[in-house]
Amino acid sequence: MINLVALTIAIIGKRQRFHSQPVTYKMNIKLIGQRSMEVFLFGIAKDIVGKSVLDLSDYMEKPNSVGELILLMNHSYPEFSKLSSIAVAVNGEYASNDVTLQSNDEIAIIPPVSGG
């Protein structure tokens, strides 16, 4: 079964009096009941992905667990697999690989830090 998160609809308007070409309108619609999932990234994880929030809503298969999320990140961003360790927090608490992810969970990837 295909899990669509966002549906883009193009509406082509009638030719208007002052336009020789049809006017095209686009809008994004989030389907009711679909899982939205955002992952907040910090430190080197943010640098690897290139942004501080990764929206997984557009992914066909969303990770069902923390372990699946880490595998997805390693596959999508090979530099992730080079990190010595990664901590994942779900709803403000550190989570092990077997923790189930639900839609609208607050997920954060916290890379190793050093300092003194």
Image (cartoon, grey):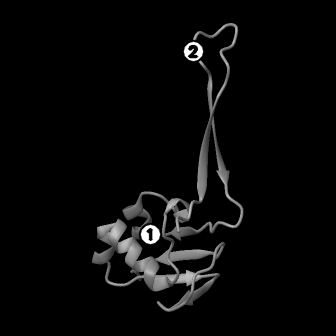
Count of labels in the image: 2
Q: Earlier in the sequence, mark 1 or mark 2?
A: 2
Residue 111 image point, x, y percent = 42, 77
The label nearer to you, 1 versus 2, is 2
* Mark 2: few/some/many CA within 10 Å (<14, 14-19, 20+): few
Residue in the foreground of this view, choosing between 46 and 31: 31
Q: Residue at x 62, y 42 (%)?
A: 9
Disc 2 marks which residue?
A: 21
Label 2 amino acid? Gln
Query: Could you say which is closer to the camera, residue 32 or residue 41?
Result: 32
**Secondary structure found at label 1:** helix
Which percent across, then down, holds residue 59? 49, 63
Residue 70: quarter of image? bottom left
Relative to 77, does residue 92 appear above or below in the rendering? below
Where does label 1 land, which residue? Answer: 43
Residue 108 higher or lower than 59, as above or below: below
User: Would you place residue 55 above or below residue 115 in this image?
Assistant: above
Distance, label 1 to label 2, CA atoms, is 48 Å
The answer to whether residue 111 shows anywhere in this view is: no
Q: Relative to 72, is 3 on the left or the right?
A: right
Q: Secondary structure at mark 2?
A: loop
Amino acid type at circle 1 is: Gly
- Residue at image position (66%, 72%) is 104
The x and y percentages for residue 115 are: 40, 80
Q: Is residue 24 visible?
A: yes
